Amino acid sequence: MTDVYSNPAAYGVKLVGTIDLGDYDWAMLGVFQRESDGAILWATDQGCSCWGFLDGEGVESLDPLPDDYAHRWRKWYRDNKQHWNDERDALESLIRKVETLRRAQ
């Protein structure tokens, strides 16, 4: 089996979205939704080009969505943003998407 990012269906989740900061040295945030109960899960990872996001990791590497997720994700963004890589709009869009999914539960 591959990893949860490369093959989410094999782990019973679907990919909701990602934020990718970096290039050779990267940091990513990924959001997934469990198919069985709709639970929203997330993870962050970082590395260099020799490894990929959640490389070799399964669904057990994903954390349940905390109530303060938007605050945590914005802090993660500030801590990992490169001066040339502005993904703020994408982050805010992902936060709105997750909020819509939460309201639908």
Image: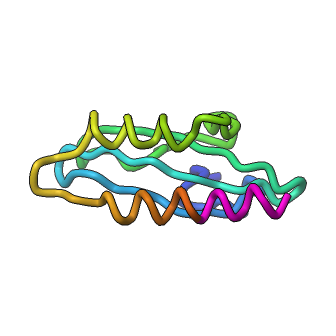
Quadrant of the drawing holding the C terminus? bottom right
Toward which corner of the image does residue 50 lie, by quadrant? top left
Q: Which residues are magenta?
A: 97-105
- Residue 35, percent from left and from top: 82, 60
Looking at the image, can residue 10 be seen? no
Q: Is residue 69 magenta?
A: no
Q: Nearer the viewer, residue 56 or 80?
A: 80
Q: Residue at x 19, y 54 (%)?
A: 23
Classify 65 as above or below 100: above
Looking at the image, can residue 25 be seen? yes
- Residue 31, percent from left and from top: 58, 53
Q: Residue at x 66, y 34 (%)?
A: 66
Task: Left or right? Give the position of 94 relative to 7.
Answer: left
- Residue 94, percent from left and from top: 51, 61
Task: Left or right? Give the position of 27 relative to 37.
Answer: left
Classify 3 as above or below 62: below
* Colour basis: rainbow
Q: Is residue 101 magenta?
A: yes
Q: Main secondary structure of the magenta part?
A: helix
- Residue 65, percent from left and from top: 67, 40
Task: Left or right? Give the position of 70 relative to 32.
Answer: left
Q: Nearer the viewer, residue 78 or 62?
A: 78
Q: Residue at x 38, y 49 (%)?
A: 52
Toward which corner of the image does residue 46 lie, by quadrant? top left
Q: Residue at x 17, y 50 (%)?
A: 24
Q: Residue furthest left?
A: 84
